[in-house]
Image: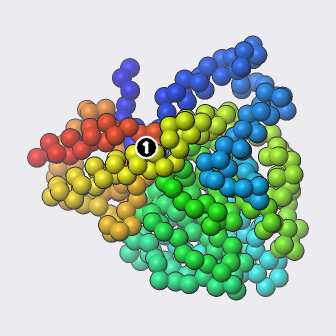
């Protein structure tokens, strides 16, 4: 079976080395005579995996001991609730959000169940085609929440605002893809399945000093402080996704880290966007200044050519190019592990469409 060019938005492409090592671990983990899927999460072998999986995140992000790293279940969707539970004060609390896409809107919906939320900016009326920028975040808020990259609509925050409160960011679809001053953030979360691992685990990076100040009685499973105290082992962790995420981060580290990944991602995005802009048959969904390096959403301007284009890209071994059902068109996800050669295959198909 020939390998496909995988442009899926998630679960996504991972390095071939990660697939190989993961497969070996499923059959026999570390020569134990046991599969990774059947070992105890309390065994010294898996504790070592969890310890390194947490440590490597802080190395890559260049964060100090004031931050803790957790691997939790429930996806980013559970974080939509855990964030206000842990950061919004029980009395007179209020949070600020910016609405840049479907997942930002979902986070806002959950936060409103916990207390007042001010939406400081929104591009919903323009089908989320740009990132709102003209807003200020004052100290009257318990925290400010943003979504760094919008997987469906193909926009990305190229910079982040200065705030007078805590800053929280959902980095699910562009985590570890570009150099950022991660110390600007008090809490970062990301579903692994879009750029750092398989589905089933969510990364949380949180500054310890911000916790325990809400006056809320937080349910145990939702309490960051308890998960930190138990070293991300309060309940049985998702063993396989944590291990595969560790392999992915080790691959990233030994191949030049985040800076090298960013250079590769910029080259891939430039190649595809240049063709979209050059080719009169295609058009980007969003404004140029806010285009995502991770998720390129675009459409055909001549729908009579849709059948021919779909047939051509499928024949070229391309997978996962259809756009999200809420937007239509096409979406090419250019995550870290996607080689530029796959992007070139797509660009060649676009060039040959007549």
Residue at image coords 62%, 53%:
61
Q: Is residue 276 left or right of residue 258?
A: left
Indicate the position of residue 135 as horizontal and vertical percent values.
52, 83
Name the image quarter holding the N terminus.
Answer: top left
Residue at image coords 52%, 27%:
17
Indicate the position of residue 142 as horizontal and vertical percent values.
72, 78
The colour scheme used to paint the residues is: rainbow
Q: Residue furthest left?
A: 354
Indicate the position of residue 322 as horizontal and vertical percent values.
36, 48
Residue at image coords 34%, 52%:
269
Indicate the position of residue 202 as horizontal and vertical percent values.
66, 49
**313 lies above or below 111:** above
**38 lies above or below 315:** above
Q: Quadrant of residue 193?
A: top right
Q: Quadrant of residue 23?
A: top right
Please say whether residue 125 is visible from this viewpoint: yes
The 10 Å Cα crowd at callout 1, few under 14, some 14 to 19, many 20 or more, is: many
**162 lies above or below 24:** below
Q: Which residue is mark 1?
A: 8
């Amino acid at each position: 079976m020939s390998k496909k060019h995988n442009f899926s938005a998630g679960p996504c492409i991972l390095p071939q080395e990660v697939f190989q090592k993961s497969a070996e671990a499923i059959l026999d983990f570390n020569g134990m005579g046991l599969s990774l899927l059947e070992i105890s999460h309390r065994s010294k072998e898996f504790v070592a995996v969890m310890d390194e999986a947490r440590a490597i995140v802080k190395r890559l992000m260049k964060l100090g001991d004031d931050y803790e790293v957790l691997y939790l279940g429930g996806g980013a969707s559970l974080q939509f609730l855990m964030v206000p539970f842990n950061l919004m004060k029980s009395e007179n609390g209020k949070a600020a959000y910016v609405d840049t896409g479907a997942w930002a809107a979902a986070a806002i919906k959950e936060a409103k169940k916990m207390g007042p939320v001010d939406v400081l900016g929104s591009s919903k009326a323009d089908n989320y085609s740009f990132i709102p920028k003209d807003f200020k975040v004052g100290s009257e808020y318990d925290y400010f929440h943003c979504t760094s990259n919008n997987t469906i609509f193909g926009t990305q925050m190229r910079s982040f605002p200065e705030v007078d409160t805590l800053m929280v960011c959902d980095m699910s679809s562009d985590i570890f893809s570009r150099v950022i001053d991660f110390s600007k953030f008090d809490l970062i979360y990301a579903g692994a399945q879009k750029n750092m691992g398989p589905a089933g685990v969510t990364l949380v990076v949180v500054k310890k000093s911000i916790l325990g100040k809400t006056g809320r009685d937080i349910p145990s499973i939702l309490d960051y402080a308890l998960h930190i105290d138990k070293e991300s082992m309060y309940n049985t962790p998702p063993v396989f996704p944590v291990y595969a995420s560790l392999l992915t981060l080790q691959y990233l580290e030994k191949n030049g880290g985040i800076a090298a990944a960013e250079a590769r991602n910029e080259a891939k995005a430039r190649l595809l966007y240049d063709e979209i802009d050059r080719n009169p048959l295609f058009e980007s969904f969003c404004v140029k200044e806010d285009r995502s390096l991770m998720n390129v959403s675009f459409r055909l301007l001549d729908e009579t050519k849709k059948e021919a284009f779909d047939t051509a890209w499928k024949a070229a071994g391309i997978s996962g190019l259809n756009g999200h059902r809420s937007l239509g068109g096409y979406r090419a996800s250019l995550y870290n592990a996607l080689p530029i050669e796959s992007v070139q295959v797509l660009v060649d198909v676009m060039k040959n469409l007549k």
